[in-house]
Amino acid sequence: MIVPKKHISIYESLLGLSNFIHIQLKENKLTVDELWTKYQKINNSKKFPAKHNFDNLILAIDILFSLKKIKLNQDGKLENEDY
């Protein structure tokens, strides 16, 4: 689900996952694999109480690219456009 609704929490939505990605990229420039590894550590835990798969991660990255919030640098790493 892309957006939260009455019975879908922000964590279960792609917007919530996009927010997690955006926050992670504020701290470091990461490859998609590194981002997936970071997410797997908190997937379905108290920090992020929803389970997403790799396809959802890619869709969330696509949302951020569409909104021009992230870009791919010369090293093949994702980074924030804002900073």
Image: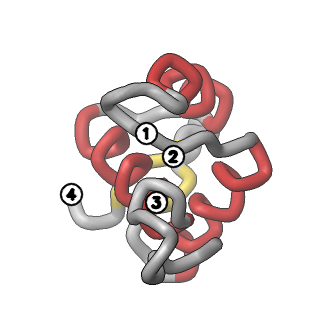
Circles 2 and 1 in contact, beta carbons < 8 Å? no
Dot 1 alpha-carbon crowd within 10 angstroms: few under 14, some 14 to 19, many 20 or more: some
Callout in the foreground (2, 3): 3
Question: Residue 78's mark?
Answer: 2
Q: Residue 82 in the image: x percent, y percent? A: 24, 65
Dot 3 alpha-carbon crowd within 10 angstroms: few under 14, some 14 to 19, many 20 or more: many
Q: CA separation, marks 2 and 1?
A: 24 Å
Q: CA separation, marks 4 and 3?
A: 17 Å
The one nearer the camera, 18 or 77, is: 18
The residue where tag 4 is placed is 83
Dot 4 alpha-carbon crowd within 10 angstroms: few under 14, some 14 to 19, many 20 or more: few
The one nearer the camera, 27 or 47, is: 47
* Residue 27 occupies quadrant: top left
Is the C terminus in the top left, top right, bottom left or bottom right quadrant? Answer: bottom left
Name the element at disc 1: loop
Q: Residue 22 in the image: x percent, y percent? A: 36, 54
Name the element at disc 3: helix
Q: CA separation, marks 2 and 3?
A: 13 Å
- Labels 2 and 3: the sequence-earlier one: 3
- Labels 4 and 3: the sequence-earlier one: 3
Callout in the foreground (2, 1): 1
